[in-house]
Image: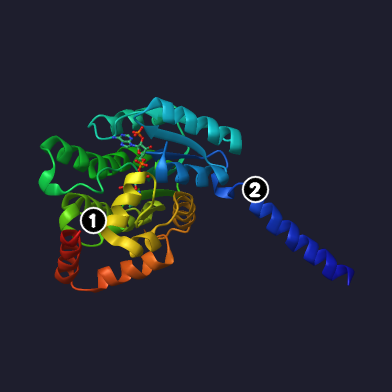
């Protein structure tokens, strides 16, 4: 009897201490979250902090970076470095990688989160906005991956998480350019997953449906998708937690939410022309 009680106490202790202690993989390690001061990026940063990762957060605005840093350091007792960069600029990836290499940062995870432009119709975009969207959504993820690869390789096993969207699963006429940039992120991640397998670097792509990180997204989702859109929405906190958990599980495509997974399956299963014409009609009806 005493033996059984000791065994139960041992298992209980093991469960409790696993739940409270940092991920054993994370001790002293850093994760870089590009676009980590707000929204989904902040939630990803928080899910990493809960697992004991130190963080490097990147965004354009110093004020929101400082407020994210203070909150995360205070709540999780980890170290947070902040770098203010516009990731759409050509030189940013090289400067960020130089900063990390000079300090020999033990980088375990790169999260390419920053992106722009969900609601805008391609036909009404000014040229500079069009270039900005491509440079940020596609260019920054591809450049940061390449410039930070030596550090990720040095600290392997390591992880890359790119943030795509469910909008990347099929062409969406009203969000033409946005869905094209997100499908580029999806294809890029698929290829890279296999290219980096030998280096023990796992690549994942997070493809969320609607996440109400700001009021415009809620309004746009309600207008275009109505009741269904509200059912598809997943909170930023939940998205961040699922994203980090599944990236550490080396899952290639991550779609948070049960209904979203179901929809994502059908969108990819149905003929592309049919899905595109449904999206086109849905966009015109509103
Ligand atoms: N929200 C959704 O419904 C949804 C759905 C599917 C996919 N996504 C994707 O998820 C990602 C995050 O979306 P979100 O809604 O969380 O966005 P968000 O709330 O606007 O946050 C974006 C983050 O990226 C930073 N950022 C934006 N532009 C930047 C730039 N040029 N250079 C450096 N940092 C920049 C922002 O800080 P600063 O403004 O200070 O730079 C902020 O930290 C995007 O890639 C988006 O396409 C979002």
Spot occupied by residue 240 in the image (x, y as percentages of width and height): 46, 50
- At mark 2, the secondary structure is loop
Q: Which residue is mark 2?
A: 21
Q: Which residue is mark 1?
A: 183
- Among the two numbered marks 1 and 2 on one chain, the one whose residue lies closer to the N terminus: 2
Label 2 crowd (10 A; few <14 / some 14-19 / many >=20): few
Q: Residue furthest right?
A: 2
Q: Is residue 106 left or right of residue 278?
A: right
Spot occupied by residue 227 in the image (x, y as percentages of width and height): 35, 64
Can you tell which mark lies on residue 41? none
Q: Is residue 279 left or right of residue 236?
A: left
Residue 153 shows in the view: no
Q: Residue at x 40, y 31 (%)?
A: 100
Whether residues under marks 1 and 2 lie with C-beta atoms below 8 angstroms apart, the answer is no
Q: Is mark 1 within 8 Å of ligand 1?
A: no
Residue 63 shows in the view: yes
Q: Nearer the viewer, mark 1 or mark 2?
A: 1
Front residue of 226 and 14: 226
Ligand 1: image quarter: top left
Q: Is mark 2 within 8 Å of ligand 1?
A: no
Quadrant in the picture for residue 10:
bottom right
Quadrant assignment for the N terminus: bottom right
Q: Residue at x 32, y 45 (%)?
A: 216
Front residue of 96 and 61: 61
Mark-to-mark CA distance, 1 and 2? 37 Å
Label 1 crowd (10 A; few <14 / some 14-19 / many >=20): many
Quadrant assignment for the C terminus: bottom left
């Amino acid at each position: 009897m005493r033996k059984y009680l000791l065994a139960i106490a041992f298992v209980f202790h093991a469960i409790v201490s696993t739940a409270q202690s940092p991920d054993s993989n994370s001790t002293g390690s850093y994760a870089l979250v590009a676009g980590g001061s707000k929204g989904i990026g902040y939630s990803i940063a928080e899910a990493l902090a809960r697992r004991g990762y130190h963080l490097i957060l990147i965004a354009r605005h110093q004020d929101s970076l400082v407020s994210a840093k203070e909150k995360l350091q205070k709540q999780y007792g980890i170290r947070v470095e902040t770098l203010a960069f516009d990731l759409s600029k050509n030189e940013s990836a090289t400067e960020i990688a130089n900063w990390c290499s000079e300090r020999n940062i033990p980088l375990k995870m790169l999260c390419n989160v920053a992106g722009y432009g969900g609601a805008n119709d391609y036909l009404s975009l000014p040229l500079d906005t069009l270039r900005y969207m491509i440079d940020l959504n596609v260019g920054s993820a591809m450049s940061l991956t390449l410039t930070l690869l030596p550090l990720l390789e040095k600290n392997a096993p390591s992880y890359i998480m790119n943030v795509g969207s469910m909008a990347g699963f099929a062409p969406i006429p009203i969000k033409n350019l946005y869905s094209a940039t997100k499908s580029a992120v999806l294809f890029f991640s698929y290829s890279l997953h296999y290219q980096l397998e030998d280096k023990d670097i796992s690549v994942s792509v997070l493809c969320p449906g609607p996440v109400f990180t700001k009021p415009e997204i809620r309004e746009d989702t309600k207008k275009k998708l109505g009741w269904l859109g509200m059912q598809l929405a997943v909170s930023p906190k939940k998205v961040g937690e699922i994203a980090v958990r599944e990236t550490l599980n080396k899952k290639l495509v991550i779609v948070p939410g049960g209904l979203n997974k179901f929809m994502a399956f059908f969108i990819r299963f149905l003929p592309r022309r049919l899905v595109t014409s449904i999206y086109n009609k849905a966009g015109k009806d509103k």
